[in-house]
Amino acid sequence: MTVRNLVVVLGDQLDLDSAAFDGFEPGRDRVWMCEAPAESRYVWTHQARIAIFLAAMRHFRVALEARGWRVDYQASGAHPHTTLAEALSAAVAALQPQQLVWVEAGEWRLARDLEQVAASVGLPFDVRADRHFLCSRDDFDSWMRGRTHPRLEHFYRWMRGRSGLLISADGQPEGGQWNYDSDNRRSFGAQGPGFVPQTRRFEPDAITRDVLALVEAQYPDHPGSLAGFDWPLTREQARVALADFVEHRLADFGPYQDAMWDREPLLWHSRLSAAMNLKLLSPREVIDAAVAALHARQAPLASVEGFVRQIVGWREYVRGLYWHHMPQYLDDNALGAHEPLPPFYWNGKTEMRCLRITIEDTLANGYAHHIQRLMITGLFALLLGVDPRQVHEWYLAVYVDAVEWVELPNSIGMSQHADGGLMGSKPYIASGKYIAKMSNYCSGCRYDPALSTGPKACPFTTLYWDFLARHRQRFAAHPRLVMQVRNLDRMQPEAVSAIRAEAELLRQRLRA
Ligand code: FAD
Ligand code: SF4
């Protein structure tokens, strides 16, 4: 049989309603999917991240075949190719399709590779827009036109306005405010979070167990653990996970968004990023479920708005910025940071308790919540002055939800300020005192967050002052950092010199 369209489905495109399948004729077209080892190796990928992609892909294949569609599925170990490009070239040679079809890839590198394959085999190709997102790449570029300093807040209001989401009949935001951030920055206090609902687990089925065994056999030296692997891997499971979040955690999502507590890696976060990034869930249905809970009085506006902002705002915003700024984004290093990533990022072996807990959570679960990523691992790398490319590669490797379009602007932009302020107007910097306020990590740590020099000095606090001193020129006039710079200027010069010497010793120790 002659194949008309060979429809390429990538590992993060597991959506039965995808534009890739528009006009699909089972008698004439064929789906092509491939587990390419290079995709698991181009960064030193956490075992759970490899497993979630492969297991979700294999379940998606079953869903496609249940429709009676033919899937040319290249399973790991059953084909000789390393890269997707090699495997696709071989498939084209074998199947001789008339055309290649795919939905725009989420990653710049893969978008380039697919077009190169099509060009090298001389086939026409049809790249279709990704309907998963609420803002198309063209719409984002129009919004960006003329803006040198794009800001999330402006984008978010524009998105709310044009969709009517949480907008009252008079055109004003529901509740009268665009955001409830001031209600949403609570910490727990000494008593801790109290009762935290357990998240819904999904026991591995036979397909997943095969994948877990494969990952253990083929990637034994990769970081992380598969022991508690319980992620939703099908659309049905993802919908159960969404319902579970809305019923049990959404109401308290808002107030404690920024809080951290040891042995509570999830708190009231949704744990839905991986299912959304694999496209098992659409952002629309996630938001609709949250807004329905608001209207049914099951969750307060501050929590629902806070949650909606993450998805309609941040998630769409970083995707737009990624495509707008690639491939330059990969090389951004506005603060001239060149330190190597400390080895403890890969094993958690450090006496800094906040980092140890966050990295141990990450290695155990392939998950850490946003504030752990931004204000623990990200903050330390920023203050230390780690090469942003190495920071990016770590974040891309260790989280099950990591796909470059969302990970890279968050790492290089939001957390390392290496894009010079494209993503956020100022670097997210803080001393150990912020961590002491927002978590219980400092109790039981051998360091003291209030100290910047001496044997008990908290490395975050030392490096915080050192960062301000190193970048004083750059940030002295910044309206949102001026107070912090003024505090630095109030210090005695000898005290600043002592901090800077201590920071340098710390860097030397961490390089060793
Ligand atoms: P919740 O806290 O429940 O938030 C709800 C949803 O909002 C998330 O599922 C996610 O889809 C979206 N969201 C929240 N914050 C952001 C954000 N800053 N950017 C984009 N979407 C957001 N998110 C990823 O999906 N993949 C990544 O690889 C990734 N890497 C990150 C790296 C760094 C350095 C930082 C600071 C953040 C990163 N994030 C990434 C964003 C955010 O931390 C995760 O989306 C979130 O922690 C996922 O957990 P959750 O589903 O429980 O989120
Ligand atoms: Fe982290 Fe410093 Fe607190 Fe220790 S004292 S947990 S290193 S912030």
Image (cartoon, rainbow, N blue to C red):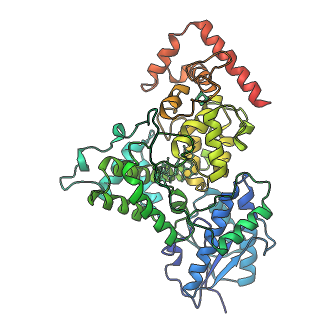
Residue 165 vertical placement versus 455 (above, below): below
Q: How many numbered circles does the render carry?
A: 0
- Provide residue 154's location: percent of width, then percent of height: 37, 44
Rendered residue at 23%/45% (across/down): 176
Indicate the quadrant where residue 411 lies: top right
Residue 7 vertical placement versus 376 (above, below): below
Q: Which of 28 and 452 is in front in this view?
A: 452
Whether residue 130 is visible to the viewer of this picture, yes or no, is no
Whether residue 202 is visible to the viewer of this picture, yes or no, is yes
- Quadrant for the C terminus in the image: top right
- Ligand 2 is in which quadrant of the figure? top right
In the rendered structure, the answer to whether residue 87 lies left or right of residue 462 reads right
- Provide residue 156's location: percent of width, then percent of height: 37, 48
- Provide residue 465's location: percent of width, then percent of height: 58, 20
- Quadrant for the N terminus in the image: bottom right
Rendered residue at 39%/60% (across/down): 247
- Provide residue 468's location: percent of width, then percent of height: 56, 21
Indicate the quadrant where residue 89 lies: bottom right
Rendered residue at 65%/57% (across/down): 109
Residue 494 vertical placement versus 394 (above, below): above
Q: Nearer the viewer, residue 345 or 251?
A: 251
Residue 22 vertical placement versus 376 (above, below): below
